Image (cartoon, rainbow, N blue to C red):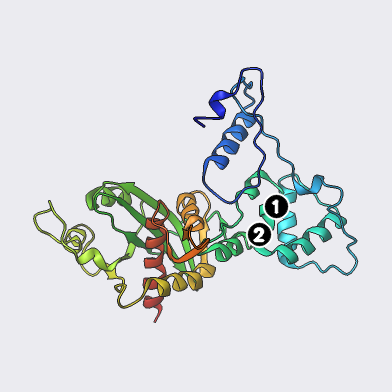
Amino acid sequence: KSGALNSVSPDCEVIFESTSCGRGGDYEDRIMRAKKHQEMGLKLTKMDYRLIFVPWMWDETCRLDPEGVPTYPRHEEYFNSLKAKGIELDAFQRAWWIKKEEEQGPTIKLDYPSTIDEAFESILEGAYYSNEMTQLRLNHRITSVPHQPGILVDTAWDLGMDDIMVIWFTQRVGREYRIIDYMAEKDKGFDYFYDKMILKGYRYGKHYHPFDIAFREMGNMGLSRFESFEKLFGRNTIVKCPSPQQISPADGINAVRKFLPMCLFDLEKTEEGVDALDAYTKIWDNKLGTYQNSPRNDWASHPADAFRVLAICATMQEQ
């Protein structure tokens, strides 16, 4: 940005050509800005980028004789979802995609996206929940999930001191956990979240918290977080997650992997949290050229930690 782009003369063109490596980052930001500009029909200035997207089906080599290629319900669901977007594949294109997915697995959209949005659904290398999140999308479990008024809403928290506080909202319907809402704010206390939660109009059940809710916090008359929360939300509503000594972070991550297939996420209200679960990755070790078996501490950590609390506590409540 500060070097090459600023040295481009007015009579030159800048071309970015790349394959997406998942959500987030400068590349997605540029693509989505250009897409929005295009959709709004705005005239391009000399400093705007024109979006050119080339989907795989434009390639005439992406065709295969359909004889002997079985089509399963999940394939039909995917092809129908494309048709709803105005993309209709013929039998030879469908056969090619089915066999290519068989070869590539959940990474197929990385190199063979059908739409621009699909290009950014691809899994992140080193991401803890890449396979689970991809399967959720393939099975259309990130969709519209309305609040059910007759069912209590449970919440799961990650508590930040002078940091980000995160809440996931869920309703259990049968064996299914419907993740209906999400909140994340920086430098806000329980009073603020209480007011916002009441305005949502949900009837609340249990509130799942990390073990450190029992720690004392400064500047609140010496009250522990537990006591501060209890004053607002009432006694007997708090469920404390076991400490890392009782359930290791690795076991907690495995609990999330088992829990995710039982979940439905609301596409609109939980988008930010879902992005974080996609982006929750291991630390890259430059010296060894591989990923360490420990999570990177970045913007995705707090939402992922809160969801781990949800997975562990919800599973405990079932037992």
Residue assigned mark 2:
107
Among all residues in the image, which is located at the extreme top?
A: 10
Q: Quadrant of residue 36?
A: top right
Between the residue at mark 1 and the residue at mark 2, the CA separation in whole angstroms equals 8 Å
Q: Quadrant of residue 42?
A: top right
Residue assigned mark 1:
111
Q: Is residue 296 left or right of residue 125?
A: left
Q: Position of residue 232 (x, y in %)?
A: 20, 57
Binning the other alpha carbons within 10 Å of mark 2 as few (below 14), some (14 to 19) or many (20 upward) gives many
Among all residues in the image, which is located at the extreme bottom?
A: 319
What kind of residue is marked 2? Answer: Thr
Residue shown at 49% from the left, 50% from the top: 271
Q: Nearer the viewer, residue 94 or 246?
A: 246
Q: Nearer the viewer, residue 92 or 294?
A: 294
User: Which element type, helix, strand or loop, lies under badge 1?
Assistant: helix
Query: Where is 247 relative to 163, above or below?
Result: below
Number of numbered tags placed on the structure image: 2
Q: Nearer the viewer, residue 319 or 112?
A: 112
User: Which element type, helix, strand or loop, lies under badge 2?
Assistant: helix
Among all residues in the image, which is located at the extreme left?
A: 221
Residue shown at 62% from the left, 17% from the top: 10
What kind of residue is marked 1? Answer: Asp
Q: Are marks 1 and 2 in contact (CB under 8 Å)?
A: yes
Q: Position of residue 135 (x, y in %)?
A: 61, 64
Q: Can residue 36 be seen from the camera position used here?
A: yes
Residue shown at 27% from the left, 68% from the top: 211
Residue shown at 36% from the left, 50% from the top: 184
Q: Position of residue 237 (x, y in %)?
A: 26, 67
Question: Quadrant of the image for the C terminus?
Answer: bottom left
